[in-house]
Amino acid sequence: MKPKAFEYVRADTLAVLLQALAAHDGAKIIAGGQSLVPMMNFRLAQPEVLIDINGIAELNHVTSDGAVIRIGAMTRYRDLLDSACLNARIPLLAAAVRHVGYPAIRNRGTLGGSLVHNDPSAEAGVVLTCLGAELLVVCAGAERRLPLAEFFVTTYLTDIAQNEVLTEIRVPIPPAGAGFAFKEVARRVGDFAIVNVAAQIGSNAQGEVTSLSLALGGVAETPIRADVEGSLLGRLIDMPLAARVAAEVDAMIDPQDDNVARGDYKRHLAGVLVKQALLEAHAGSRAGD
């Protein structure tokens, strides 16, 4: 199939983009187009107006202010992988991006586009949920900041109005020496994950856990952050403890059957990946001391 006919608008500045969004109720934004174009081809999305934002340089950046990495919403996955700042300060995000699709997809796909699309097993949403990212969303004359967890509503639905645009993702820089792990299982290399898990752990000189964040994708309608700090803070993570925490996570989730995998298989994968991620992230944190 081919897309339904649409009007094309090119916006080369954020101001022009906001004006175009205010003027066209049925508009959709396109940058990488890795999700939108296939949906248009199958007529699952039928925008009346398509606004091309590839010329807006101010939405493509990776910078640091000392405590936070600021990433423009139009920053492509390839730019993230090539960013020395990102690889040095937030290696967990770089590790997750390496799992995104194929080189052609990483060359065109954008971080902001993935978040607005909100596939619950997309790597970006899971890892940024683990990292506690905050989003900047703007419209003409106003802006708002919100945690990523509040931005995700349900599968393919986010808290963004027709006249708003996601402009920036702000990611707290982890403490020095924090360990990390990103694990996922997909049917084939480059496919969306069946289940994925991101973990970040800080520990002291004795290896006792001092900070922890754990997030899962593919097991609910949005990425979820698992509250397991009470079981791990102040402790050394070994296989028996990792297994007990995986059992706690199992009780928190209720994965459903879909066209990729059964819910019980997703549950099994989640347990395996949680154990692997906790052990690897903890080992990395101890190595960093």
Image: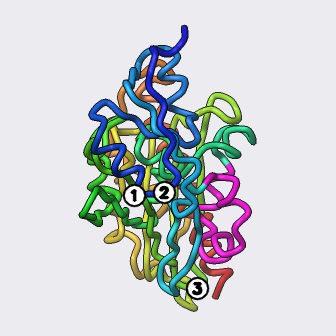
- Which residue is painted at 61% across and 77% down in the image? 89
State how many labels appear. 3
Residue placed under numbered mark 2 in the picture: 13
Between discs 3 and 2, the one toward the N terminus: 2
- Name the mark on residue 176: 3
Relative to 162, is 197 on the left or the right? right
The C terminus: image quadrant: bottom right
Q: Between marks 2 and 1, how big is the CA–CA gap?
A: 5 Å
Looking at the rendering, the stretch of residues picked out in magenta corresponds to 76-98
**Amino acid type of the residue that numbered disc 1 sits on in the rendered structure:** Ala
Q: Is residue 149 above or below residue 250?
A: below
Question: Neighbour class for label 3 at 10 Å: few (<14), some, many (≥20)?
Answer: few
Residue 226 shows up from this direction: no
Relative to 134, is 92 on the left or the right? right
What's the colour scheme? rainbow
Residue placed under numbered mark 1 in the picture: 15
Q: Nearer the viewer, residue 48 or 173?
A: 48
Q: Between marks 3 and 2, how big is the CA–CA gap?
A: 37 Å
Between discs 3 and 1, the one toward the N terminus: 1
Instruction: Locate residue 59, reporting x and y percent.
Output: 52, 60
**Amino acid type of the residue that numbered disc 3 sits on in the rendered structure:** Ala
- Asked if the residues shown at circle 2 and circle 1 are in contact, with their CB atoms under 8 angstroms apart, the answer is yes
- Which residue is painted at 69% across and 68% down in the image? 83
Q: Nearer the viewer, residue 217 or 243?
A: 217
Where residue 79 sits, quadrant-wise, is bottom right
Instruction: Locate residue 252, reporting x and y percent.
Output: 30, 48
Where residue 155 sits, quadrant-wise, is top left
**Amino acid type of the residue that numbered disc 2 sits on in the rendered structure:** Thr
